[in-house]
Every structure is written in structure tokens, then in C-alpha cells.
């Protein structure tokens, strides 16, 4: 495609020249410093988040295993807890105390696992956002 | 790319980049410099993915062009040509500003035509390179250049005769 001579000359004659190049670069360097700071801060936050998650996971597994072991180590014919009240529902609850304790613990562990999965997803999203920033 | 290398490259190219954005912003130096800074920060953040093939300027112009289009898209109200004329004359009171007629004429072009014309006449890129920078086909660029040139000549003739 050929250039229109008149337009080309007009553009060439009016090419802007900037005298504030140094000020522009100083301003850019300041922005880059701020961006670096934010980037490092986000990376540190992700690292801390990751560490907290690993600690929570390990503590959860250990405490879960210990509690289940304790439940299983108690005699099967003795209830885990009693209410010292002879009403129908509470009596039934005391008789099935091992089952309830195990179920409650399982539910708590499931909630913990869901929370860990959600945290992992958050971290992945944060990383993606950081990379595409 | 290290930060030092990036800054060295930018020092070399900043004038061309700012000139390009100044034309796209129709002489509004504050807007052009803000966009240039935004584009350079974006470029810095994605500089790890840049492969040095001696096309740093094209790569920078591509980011700047996208930044300009995003900026335009974020401005919800479209200014009429008359408003654009007022805007140009008001914000161009800078003592260094000598190109009012050209910027005034450029302000009447849609952003894509303005980009194509600026890259072709001001930055000296060929149609193929402009197509790569703007992510458009060569045919589309040729049409934009043809339409833009006609409009620009008409505007400039109306103003002071080209």
C-alpha cells in the first residue's frame, strides 16, 4: 500500500519531541517499584497461606487419627458418655455414643477437607491473577 | 528479561511510544503519558514471556494499542466530534504543542482507524506489521488506512487546506 505523500510529510513534520524523558522514566521506575512491592507482598501472602494450610492439614489428620484411636480403644460395651438421665432419647443417645462420636468426627473431617480444597482453589486463582496482572 | 534490561529498552523506545499514544489521544499529553505508563507496567509484568527477537518496539506498541482500546472502551459516553474538538483545543494549550490541526483531524477518526493511520504514517510500520500489532487482518488494515486517509484529508482540507 502506497503512502500519501502529503500526509506522510505532515506526520513527519509534526513528530513530537519530548523534553521530559527523564521525569517520565523516574515516574515509571516509581511505578515499577510499587508493582514489585505488591507482587512480593502477594507472593509472601500466598506462601503464608500455603504454610497455614499445610499445618492445618497435618494437625487435622493427627488429631483425627488420635481421636478415632481413642474412641476405638474404649471398651465396646461401655458408652463413651452418659447423661445420668433415664429419658428415652438421651438413653438412646448414650447407648450409641461411639457411633455418634465417630459420625461427628467424620463430618468435621469432611468439612476440613472441603475447606482445604477451597483454599487450594483460592491459591490457584490468586496465582493466575498474579500472572495475568 | 531482567528489570535493568527492560528499563534500558524502555529508555530507548519511550519517545516513540509516547508519540504514538499522543497521536491516539489526539494531543492530550496527560492521558497519553498515563496510558504509556500503564502500558509499560503491563509490559514489565509480562516481560518474562517476551522473547527477544529485536521486536521490542512492536511488542510494546501492541500492548500500548490494547491499553488504549481498553481505556476507550471504559469511557462509557462517546464524545461527539464537537466535544472532541473542544477537548483537543482545551487540553492542548501546552507551549510545546504545535500539532493541533493534525490531532484535531485525528480526533474525528474511530480509534482503530486512528491506530492504523498513526502506525502507518507516524511510526512507519508496514501493513503486515500493523496487522500483527493490532491483531487484525491485512485487508482490514488496508480498508482502515484507506478510509482513515480519506477522512483525514477531508478534515485537514476543511481546516486549513492540505
Image (tube, coloured by chain):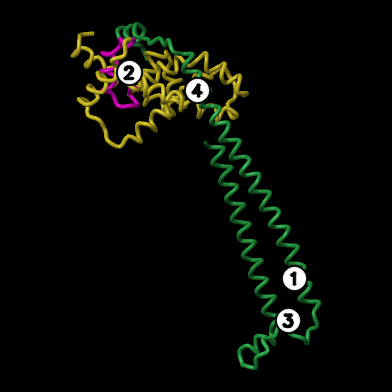
**Which residue has dot 2 on it?**
B27
Q: Earlier in the sequence, mark 4 or mark 1?
A: 4
Could you tell me residue B98's position as x and y percent?
Answer: 30, 9
Q: Residue furthest front?
A: A84
Is residue A19 visible to us here? yes
**Residue shown at 69%/80% (left/top)?**
A99
**Which residue has dot 1 on it?**
A67
Image position of B121 with respect to A91: above or below: above
**Residues marked 1 and 3 touching at CB (< 8 Å):** no
Q: Which mark is residue B102?
A: none
Q: Nearer the viewer, residue A54 or B2?
A: A54
Q: Is the same chain shared between marks 1 and 2?
A: no
Chain letter for mark 2, please: B
Q: Which mark is residue A28?
A: 4
**Residue shown at 58%/31% (left/top)?**
A36
Cα gap from disc 4 to disc 3, whole angstroms:
68 Å
Q: Which residues are magenta?
A: B96-114
Chain letter for mark 3, please: A
Q: Which chain is green?
A: A
Cα gap from disc 1 to disc 2, whole angstroms:
72 Å
Question: Does residue A33 appear to the left or right of B124 in the view shown?
Answer: right
Q: How many marks?
A: 4
Q: Tell me which corner region of the image, top left, top right, bottom left or bottom right, holds residue A64.
A: bottom right
Q: Tell me which corner region of the image, top left, top right, bottom left or bottom right, holds residue B146.
A: top left
Chain letter for mark 1, please: A
Name the secondary structure under disc 1: helix
Q: Earlier in the sequence, mark 4 or mark 3?
A: 4
Q: Is the same chain shared between marks 4 and 2?
A: no
Label 3 Cα neighbours within 10 Å, binned few <14 / some 14-19 / many ≥20: some
Q: Is the same chain shared between marks 4 and 3?
A: yes
Amino acid at each position: 500500500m502506497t503512502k500519501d505523500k502529503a500526509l506522510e510529510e505532515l506526520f513527519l513534520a509534526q513528530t513530537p519531541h519530548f523534553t521530559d524523558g527523564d521525569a517520565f522514566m523516574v515516574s515509571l521506575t516509581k511505578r515499577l517499584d510499587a508493582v514489585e512491592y505488591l507482587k512480593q507482598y502477594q507472593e509472601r501472602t500466598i506462601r503464608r497461606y500455603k504454610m497455614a494450610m499445610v499445618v492445618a492439614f497435618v494437625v487435622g489428620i493427627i488429631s483425627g487419627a488420635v481421636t478415632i484411636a481413642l474412641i476405638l480403644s474404649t471398651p465396646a460395651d461401655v458408652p463413651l458418655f452418659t447423661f445420668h438421665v433415664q429419658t428415652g432419647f438421651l438413653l438412646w443417645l448414650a447407648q450409641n455414643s461411639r457411633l455418634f462420636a465417630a459420625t461427628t468426627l467424620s463430618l468435621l473431617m469432611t468439612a476440613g477437607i472441603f475447606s482445604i480444597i477451597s483454599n487450594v482453589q483460592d491459591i490457584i486463582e490468586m496465582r493466575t491473577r498474579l500472572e495475568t496482572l | 528479561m531482567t528489570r535493568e534490561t527492560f528499563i534500558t529498552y524502555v529508555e530507548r523506545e519511550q519517545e516513540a511510544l509516547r508519540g504514538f499514544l499522543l497521536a491516539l489521544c489526539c494531543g492530550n499529553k496527560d492521558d497519553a503519558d498515563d496510558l504509556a505508563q500503564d502500558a509499560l507496567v503491563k509490559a514489565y509484568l509480562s516481560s518474562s514471556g517476551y522473547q527477544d527477537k529485536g521486536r521490542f518496539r512492536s511488542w510494546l506498541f501492541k500492548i500500548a494499542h490494547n491499553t488504549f482500546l481498553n481505556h476507550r472502551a471504559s469511557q462509557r459516553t462517546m464524545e461527539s466530534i464537537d466535544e472532541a474538538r473542544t477537548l483537543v483545543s482545551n487540553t492542548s494549550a501546552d507551549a510545546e504543542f504545535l500539532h493541533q490541526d493534525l490531532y484535531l483531524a485525528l480526533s474525528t477518526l474511530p480509534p482503530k482507524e486512528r491506530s492504523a493511520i498513526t502506525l502507518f504514517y507516524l511510526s512507519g510500520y508496514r501493513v503486515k506489521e500493523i496487522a500483527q500489532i493490532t491483531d487484525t487482518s491485512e485487508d482490514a488494515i488496508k480498508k482502515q488506512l484507506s478510509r482513515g486517509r480519506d477522512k483525514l484529508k477531508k478534515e485537514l482540507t476543511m481546516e486549513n487546506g492540505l
